[in-house]
Image (cartoon, coloured by chain):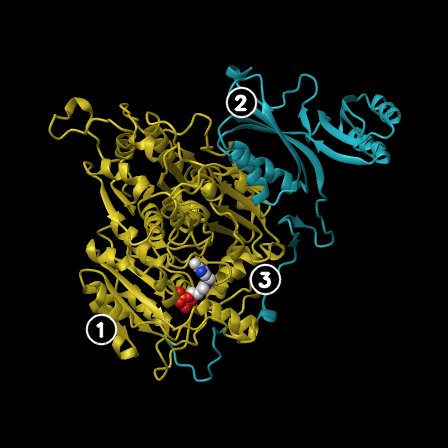
Chain colours: A cyan, B yellow
Amino acid sequence: MSRRDEDRRQGLEGPEPEERKRPVGRRNSQGIRVDPEVEAEHEPRRTIISAYVENEPGVLARVSGLFHRRQFNIESLTVGPTQNEGYSRITLVIEEPEPGIDQAKKQLEKVLPVVHVRELDNKPVARELVILKVNGDEPDKVQAITEMYDGQTLDAGPRTVTVQITGDESKIDDAIDAYEQFGIREIARTGQAALARGEEETARVDETHT
Amino acid sequence: MSGEPAQVPSDSDADAETGPKDIETGADAVVRALENAGVEHLFGVQGGAIMPVYDALYDSEMTHITMGHEQGAAHAADAYGIVSGEPGVCMATSGPGATNLVTGLADSNMDSDPVIALTGQVSTDFVGSDAFQETDTVGVTTPITKANFFADDSEAVGTDVGTAFALAKRGRQGPTLVDLPKDVTKGEASEDPGEPQTPSTYNPPETAEPESVSEAADVLAQADKPVILAGGGVIKAEASEELREFATEHEIPVITTMPGIGAFPEDHDLALEMAGMHGTGYANMAITLTDCMLAIGTRFDDRLTGGVETFAPDAEVIHVDIDPAEISKNVEADYPLVGDAKAVVKQLSTAMPHAPEADSWREQVQEWKAEYPMDYSAPEDEPVKPQYIVERFDEETADDAIVTTGVGQHQMWACQYWTYKEPRTWVSSHGLGAMGYGVPSAIGAKIAAPDQEVVCFDGDGSFLMTCQGLSVAVREDLDITIVVLNNAAIGMVRQWQDAFFGERHMASEYPWVPDFDTLAEAFGARGFRIDTYEEVDEVVEEALAYDGPSVVDAHIDPGENVYPMVPSGGDNGLFALAEDQL
Ligand SMILES: Cc1ncc(C[n+]2csc(CCOP(=O)(O)OP(=O)(O)O)c2C)c(N)n1
């Protein structure tokens, strides 16, 4: 209760900070308890997350908004319908430290139209499509490179050649490097689509969606 | 609390005169869905796009409280949800009505309070055309609602409202919104939407895995320095009674977060009250030095943890939460127990092999209570101290009196110097810290609990943001007491300027504040004023005795600051007791 205090210290009484007992341990910036000797921080890791979602209007906006809002480092996001009417698959490539990957999955699961979420960590089948438009001055050389990367020519004119390459990410990166020499006019990349390998399910889909 | 849904007469026993009106439109279905959910009160403001719904309410038994501003409607609904445990309902028209709800919804979202918002929308054939009073309400509110729906079918709109209601309440609670285009609410409908149901894909966990529970119980029983950290989730899950029994039986000191205030009686020996930025010294010492923390229903907000590096660094953390995404979000949980707090505390109680042998810790904790008492100096020749006013109101009110607040220093004094003994008696804006929460929340609280006293501690700055709510309190004749702890400043900002900005009081002083007592009288409420200690007793008595809304303009020491204080991102164990320690 109230008390007279002439020397107006403006505050409460009690031992000073330096007189207090101190803990021995500490946590890292990710909230993980660490050995006083070791500073364990998780390095970012790149991974593919697949979400099976109901086709409600706005579901993609919800998912992308969530990733933006929570500052997950997102590299690509693809979406398309599945064999089950009314459901789509979203494939996300993110790069995050372990706790961030965990959060991304859990937060994604909270979005109502999201039926199931899985991380594809076991060498999934992942493919990306790129369409490239290059200058058409050396059509033969362009053709040679396109063949080398199992690509297809989609459009060829006197000034430009437009080709398509499909493959995993490094193949696409390599192909783009190879086309550099002709002068790349424009690129459209889809981002990765992926499924789990073999018998493994990419997402749990209940009996009604098999 | 008011848990039982109101009885809705079924068709068979309803006679033609008094029975529920037939459902003819989408709006009728919306109203029926609310009735089916047991809703008794609605807070809102009329407007073009929501008019069909209001028209359907004309024949309903539910009471609509017209607010002075939609922000107030959302805050009132929020407070109603906190006090009653049942979702509060707020309504607004499209565009500006809906955007005015946003602050309130963001607040409910941060605090996981059950609220549903019904917003009008322009007709579907106008959507996307930048029509008069059109806003993408679903887009705007997606990040700040648990779920929201754009209703596009008159026959289904009642079910949408039922789903929104059920989702607001089930699992981790939160605000939900249904956007109601005018043609959809005007369109034909005939089906009774039935009882609220969550979607079949929504299955929040009930109990935690038994094995994890036993493991956690063993760890807790082995602890030398155990504490329980009770968050708002304890209150939401109605687990206060279980918590009290568990803590008492095992003699474990209990700390609360700010939303957890009231989860454990603060006059209990084991109570250490609130930890964090303005928590008690003893709670902050205990939270820093514990070796085992049972955290229940808390999201480890940074106002609680300070810098995570120094938060409970020696502790094994057992984290009970209904939302799996809260596990290891901010602080790593060594033992996650995902489930409803009430159920999990019961599970833990059964699984505990014995109480922790922690006598020296228990003594230590009591010593800290003596070392760092919550106290203040109050020289008679100086302006009145706000803490004294809070204490005097506490002394003159019943144990179940409800306190609501604005945001700022007054809010902190209201949580530090009032002794909370019951759950659902502390109503404040925690996670969002929304100034203006005070007056509307007092209204919502009083409507939810008409038999309990309601005292609102407000700041002059916060009060000015939503004082139009007084007109509502007068019209509804609500017996609430609003105490403006008037320091002619937005004090909390000034406190930070004192501490961290070299006392440069940029835009934080309010020398132009009106006389709040006179302002109250102009609204038709009673006004009181306190300038000296001699006046306090009489004003406290008269303001509480007055049967209607009253405002106490309490002129407090403008130089008073809030202590203890942990600077933002700081180390809880190094809380400052005075300016010279910051
Ligand atoms: C809507 C809103 N705007 C701004 C702030 C930032 N803010 C936090 S506390 C505070 C001062 C509050 O002043 P007052 O209501 O007079 O209370 P006091 O701190 O003086 O008790 C301000 C401006 C806020 N929390 N909410």
Asked if ligand 1 lies within 8 A of label 2, the reply is no
Quarter-of-image position of residue B126: top left
Quarter-of-image position of residue B156: top left
| Residue at 17% over, 60% down | B547
- Residue A205, how many percent across, how many down? 55, 20
Q: Is residue B112 visible?
A: yes
Instruction: Decide if residue B316 is on the left or right side of residue A179.
Output: left
In which chain is the residue bearing label 1?
Answer: B
Quarter-of-image position of residue B516: bottom left
Q: Are marks 2 and 1 on the same chain?
A: no
Q: Which of these two is toward me, B390 or B136?
A: B136
Q: Quadrant of the N terminus of chain A?
A: bottom left
- Residue B573, how many percent across, how many down? 57, 63
Q: Which residue is identified by label 1?
A: B538
Which is more N-terminal, label 3 or label 1?
Answer: 1
In which chain is the residue bearing label 2?
Answer: A
Instruction: Decide if residue B231 is on the left or right side of residue B315.
Output: left
Q: Which of these two is toward me, B383 or A150?
A: A150
* Number of the front mark, 2 or 1: 2
Q: Quadrant of the C terminus of chain A?
A: top right
| Residue at 38% over, 55% down | B428
Instruction: Decide if residue B424 is on the left or right side of residue B450.
Output: right
- At label 2, the amino acid type is Tyr
Q: Is residue B39 visible?
A: no
Query: Is disc 2 placed on a helix, strand or loop?
Result: strand
Q: Which residue is identified by label 3?
A: B570
Question: Disc number at residue A87?
Answer: 2
| B518 versus B62 height, above or below | below
- At label 3, the amino acid type is Gly
